[in-house]
Amino acid sequence: MSDSNTTNFTNPSTFILLGIPGLEASHVWISILFCTVYAIAIMGNFIILFIVKTEPSLQEPMYYFLCMLAVTDLVLSTSILPKTLSIFWFNSREIGFSACLTQMYFVHSLSVMESGIWVAMAFDRYVAICDPLRHFTILTNSMVTKIGLAVVLRGIILTLPYPLLANQWPYCRTNIIPHTHCEYMSVVSLACVDIHVGSYYGLFLALFVTGLDVFLIGLSYTQILRAIFHLPTKDARLKTFGTCSAHLCVILTFHIPGLFSFLTQRFGHNMPIQVHILMANVYLLVPPMLNPIIYGLRTKQIRDSLVRHFTHRSN
């Protein structure tokens, strides 16, 4: 590596991603795990999109939101994993300055969008279970479109300061990023100016989005659980409770590692960097794999539609 990567310079044209420092010997094995998770995520989410598009009976709010989630998961996981695998397999560590900021923006804006979609899905389940007679009058196609647009705009607008701030700061220390992808704090911590404004905004955004969304999701599922205990039969209660608990597990799989990764990068200076990087990848790669399984294949209508497609082809 040339001296220009570690000595003083101004605004490098490229950054160097190290992958997972200290675990270089295990990069191949980690890459196999990441690649398997990614392959399952791609296949599962494409199946969800295909089934919902081709099955007229699934043209309703819950499945529209599920399609939004599938598209978000596909773009989110694809925004980081190809570059991560190129680091692990080919030692291709360089990433252009603009490409790094673009990746950073996609990662954070899509994460905010995904969290918003879960809020929308929780609200949909709340209306469907607690007020079923008004479900389709409240969540009309027009309302679903407005909710989807609001979720997308929230992700775009709230995270827009990230690349704008990162782009205007000078970088005169090093261009080496000890990470598998361009994460906001990993990039701006290399700047040679006071980044407190950007750091405080990132902290506010993480706590605001996570706190607000978890509160709204928790509120929805609290009302859902109250409704579940009033269902007439034990089987109905257990079935609905099982579905809701599975949904909550996926949501927690995203929010807990994400918040852990975010906070440890700012305050957990004694935390091994390998733990931070692995957790950052877990919250970006595991939910896209679990979402089509938990939200899709565990849903009877989608499972039945998938069986019909396969049996029709076999005949």
Image (cartoon, rainbow, N blue to C red):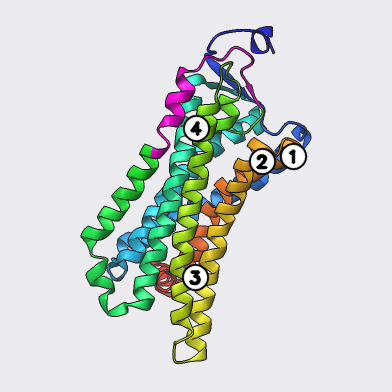
- Using residue 32 as the reference point, say whether residue 123 is left or right of it: left
Q: Which residue is mark 3?
A: 298
Residue occupying the point 65% across, 12% down: 5
Q: Secondary structure at mark 2?
A: helix
* Res. 48 image quadrant: bottom left
Q: Nearer the viewer, residue 119 or 74?
A: 119
Q: Which residue is mark 4?
A: 104
- Using residue 226 as the reference point, say whether residue 250 is left or right of it: right
* Alpha carbon separation for disc pair 1 and 3: 37 Å
**Does 169 lie within the magenta span?**
yes
Q: Secondary structure at mark 4?
A: helix
- Using residue 147 as the reference point, say whether residue 163 is left or right of it: right
The reply to whether discs 4 and 1 touch (Cβ–Cβ < 8 Å) is no
Above or below 137: residue 226: below
- Tally of marks: 4
Q: Residues within 10 Å of mark 3 (few under 14, many from 20)?
A: few
Q: Which residue is mark 1?
A: 271
Q: Amino acid at mark 3?
A: Arg
Q: Amino acid at mark 1?
A: Met
